[in-house]
Amino acid sequence: MTTSDSGEAAAVLPGVAAVGTRDIGDEAVFDRIAANLLGSIPSVAPSAVPNPDPDSQAALTAARTTPPLASTSGLPSPTAIVSSAATPFPGIGVQTSPLIDAAIRHSQIPAPMNLESAASQTGLASLSADPTLGLSSATRTATLPPGLVIHDGTLPRLFDDASGSWARSDGGSPAYYFLTPPRSHVESGPPAFDRRLFDVNDIRRDFPILNERVHGRKLVWLDNAATTQKPQAVINRLVHYYSHEYSNVHRAAHELAARSTEAYENARDKLRQFISAGASEEIIFVRGTTEAINLVAGSYGRKFIGKADEIVLSTLEHHSNIVPWQFLAEQVGAVIRVVPVTDRGEVLLSDFERTLTTRTKFVALTHVSNALGTILPVREMIDIAHRRGARVLIDGAQAVSHFPVNVQALDADFYVLSGHKMFGPSAIGVLYGKKALLDEMPPWQGGGNMIQHVTFENSTFADPPSRFEAGTAALGPAVGLGAAVDYLQRIGMDNIARHERELLSYATDALARIPGVRLIGTAPEKAGVVSFVTNQIPAEEMGKILDQEGIAVRAGHHCAQPTMARFGLESTVRPSLALYNTHEEIDHLARTIRRALQK
């Protein structure tokens, strides 16, 4: 009896029923299968391929244009009709075949039908020209980044509360996050980012605060260089931790202490993987970037930097990477030297190399300028410094949320970051240090958890990282930061970098077209920031005008007064971008600025 005679659906995938399957012994069926599979191969002559079955073709077309999620998962139906024959990118052909159609059907991820659909799915505004911005349709669509994977926002939301796993299956094929059982640890090595689809509208639904209204307007959060908003996955993880796992960590014999310790140490390991450190012992939890830099200056600096030794900084540093080194220089008699920047806000390698001398013992550099967005060539700068025998600390607070970071590939001696700037809680950050260096560093603070043995005569101290984590740690924030790492890894840092790079290009072009606006910091390599001033309205006043329209930006010196002084300014307006920002938000920003300057 054939499947179709039985009246029962044959299972072709778990949870997916194939209705009306034909008898596989029918020779005509094989002809039709051959036609469907071989018809899309350019090297096969049409005469060698049997005529495809019209009924099969019609069924495939119907399957392709029926919202599959609505019928199989109970989730909302797609917002765009699928057509595998159309490409969202002009000039790039898409090979069509029933095999591709079936793959689309089985994966339940419809593709955009045309450029307009693709634009709407990635947050692009209407493709018609916007007269208030002076941008043509070509300008608005020509910069879609190559390789960006797009879908219509109906990806099953099965990962908000689960631990992710990107381990490969036994057969070597990448595992999908929604088919892989959750595990407490992620396999080492980068996840298969190209398997995760990026849709800004889908991502925005993860952030409840983006539905907030300010002064009667929908919130537009463009203050991401100051702090980032939190996804529901991080909020949920904190609630679960405090509801079911909270206890102080280590040294207790009860169950909750074991749960809390596991959650805390798992978070440490997630951070190790996120920045590709060599060992979890190289990850030290601190309150943030500021405390991490103070720790290195106070511990490594006091031991290894002495009178007349030189500490090299760049003009673009945040105050957090200036003041601690000034404290150290005053205490030990060291000298601070500063690398200049160009009128575009670049740090040139030739200028950097000229700043180093035989007395240079330490170099502290920002990875990305918080005031201008300039990406420094830190890999090359680290190489140059190491050849001179200097150690290097990189301030990664403005980098880690925008693009992948590999501290071993950089060969950084120290790398620091803040959780609240990468969608995690505040009051938590990370100091990465090479193990050999951490082992040589004395404690920075004294107290519980950092000791081996204490008497009134003397004390001995624990190995890193405990040596540098005196007192009760910020346990919940650390667990929340681990959840933020999970969230970023599931989206894929490569995907985030593509989206933000295109958005930054669009925002730069939009603001540069406004009469009376002057951009500050126009280096070719930037991330996340578009600083500007106007010829009519002070920065702080412009910030208030934007706030009345629901647009949150930072206006001031951005804790980077030496940078401001280099450009003859006291303050700038600083819109800063993140993974959830859209082209419509940039349009709203540009319109508001233009209207303010026209009054």
Image (cartoon, grey):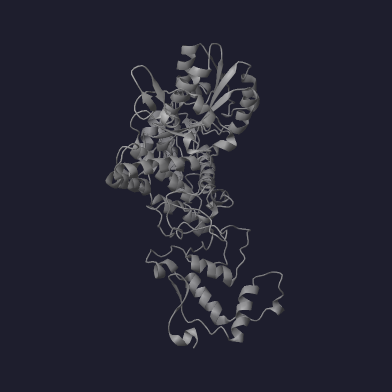
**Can residue 389 be seen here?**
yes
Say if 20 sits above or below 187 in the image.
below
Location of residue 480 (image quadrant): top left
Name the spot of residue 82 as percent of width and height, x first. Answer: 50, 66
Say if 572 sits above or below 298 in the image.
below
Residue located 35% across and 25% down the image: 447
**Of 150 and 554, which appears nearest the observer?**
150
Name the spot of residue 489 as percent of width and height, x first. Answer: 48, 48
Say if 458 sits above or below 383 in the image.
above
Residue located 45% across and 31% down the image: 464
Quadrant assignment for the C terminus: top left
**Of 304 and 423, which appears nearest the observer?**
304
Tell me: 516 left or right of 43: left
Residue extending farthest to the left is 243
**Of 184 and 10, which appears nearest the observer?**
184
Tell me: 430 left or right of 251: right
**Can residue 538 be seen here?**
no
Residue located 31% across and 38% down the image: 252
Name the spot of residue 509 as percent of width and height, x first. Answer: 54, 41
User: Looking at the image, how many numbered discs can be counted on the residues?
Assistant: 0
Name the spot of residue 581 as percent of width and height, x first. Answer: 44, 45
